[in-house]
Image (cartoon, rainbow, N blue to C red):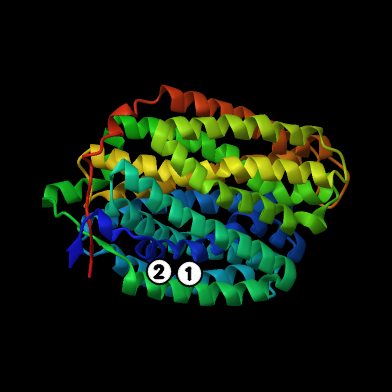
Amino acid sequence: MTSGASALTLPALFSYGLFGLPLAMLALPIYIYVAPFYAQRSSLDLAQIGAVLLAARIAAAFIDPALGAWMAHGRRSYAVYVGAALPLLLLGFGALFHPPSLSHGATLAWFLAALLFVYTAYGLAGIAHQSWGAALSHAPTQRARVTAVREGCGLLGVILAAALTSVLGYDGLSLAFAVCLLGTGALLLARAPRPLLRQGTQALRAGAWRLPLRQRAFRWLFAVLLVNGVAAAIPATLFLFFAGDYLRLGHYAGPFLIVYFCAAAASMPAWVALARRFGEARAWGGAMLLAASVFVWAYGLGAGAAWGFASICLLSGLALGADLALPPALLAGLIGAAGHAGRHEAAYFGWWNWGVQMSLALAAGIALPLLAWLGYVPGSNTGLPALSAAYALLPCALKLLAALLLWRAPLQHIYSDHLEIRPCTS
């Protein structure tokens, strides 16, 4: 085996990061498309869909820390968990987006069960993959590269999913997802650099799930994640409704998403360079301010404003690149600074994914029922002012709050060049 920072070449990084592509191909449908899919193809109304999403995401939020603690407690490599997740992801995607014809009550139960299955499989694969990357290197010069490659591949997966859904529908997306999942999964397991895991004492492993919450810096960073996550999840949940019913541009929804995620992918190298110069926290905070100053203009758009909304998608997509690349890099540095590198990454990412799921749960469980209560009905002209305010104004206020929390967070101690867990390749 060879070790050292030199092992993190671009081929090594891509053999690791490409697995983010199929995970993102799954994430886009389950977080953006699933509510309109069941609203249009089942007898469920918007309040029922929102209630199911809330219940499933709250359950998933508690499943993820349990999965992280289970991984941290065990002695198995992250590759074992990724391998176990592959067939579960295939089954879950098929069940969620190819449901059988059932009665109203059975459809509701199927929807909830399929969501829980998908979220569990996605959590298992995602926590293992994120922990794998965090264990590869904790040097400030390396960790942003690892996360940027992984999240950049994820953006390609999102763009591919949006394009395939627009052209080929969910049948084409399902086939492409299966091919990409198995291909990149095989590449990850066979060729990706393996981290050198440290073995702690049994007492440390048994209490691993509590370790992240004992870190003051993690608690601050976790609060930022929650607030910023809700700010991102609300427009993601409402995007297709806003594009279709408010802007009357539903036929352009796919291209709008592609512009948004292409901009995010293109901005990744710039955010990595800014993080290297100013630190991940400052760069991320600047991106939050950029996102809020751009996205607020969506509130003033009128029906048919295709170019205006495309411009907002482009500029806010540039800020998204920081949201994807920098928070996991910050967390990797925090893990290294706490002395938990190489053995407790899964516990941290279990809680991290809990925050992501809770953000999504709050967005769906609050925004959708609230809009239904205010009179918004999908596919109609009623309640459109409420839809516009919920889509554009509320996320901007939350972004500004997240930026304030990040500015106050005690994260300076994680910037240290001596924090390095060197990868091994076999």
Quarter residue 96 falls in: bottom right
Inspect the image, locate mark 1, and give the three-letter code of the amino acid beneath it.
Answer: Leu
Residue 129 versus residue 160: which sits nearer the camera?
Answer: 160
Image quarter in which the N terminus is found = bottom left
Residue contact at pointers 1 and 2, CB within 8 angstroms? yes
> Is 240 placed left or right of 156 in the picture?
right
Quarter residue 246 falls in: top right
Q: Which mark is residue 85?
A: 2
> Is 149 placed left or right of 235 in the picture?
left
Q: Is residue 129 above or below residue 390?
A: below
> Is 232 placed left or right of 212 in the picture?
right
* Residue plotted at (12% across, 52% down): 202
* Residue plotted at (44% across, 71% down): 184
Q: Secondary structure at mark 2?
A: helix
Residue 129 versus residue 121: which sits nearer the camera?
Answer: 129
| Residue at image mark 1 | 89
* Residue plotted at (20% across, 41% down): 339
Q: How many marks?
A: 2
Coordinates of residue 306 in the picture (x, y in percent): 83, 47
Q: Secondary structure at mark 1?
A: helix
Quarter residue 108 falls in: bottom right
Residue 14 versus residue 94: which sits nearer the camera?
Answer: 14
Dot 1: within a 10 Å radius of its alpha carbon, few (fewer than 14), some, or many (20 or more) residues?
many
Q: Is residue 157 visible?
A: yes
Coordinates of residue 24 in the picture (x, y in percent): 53, 60
* Residue plotted at (46% across, 37% down): 274
Dot 2: within a 10 Å radius of its alpha carbon, few (fewer than 14), some, or many (20 or more) residues?
many
Coordinates of residue 150 in the picture (x, y in percent): 44, 56
Residue 396 versus residue 366: which sits nearer the camera?
Answer: 396
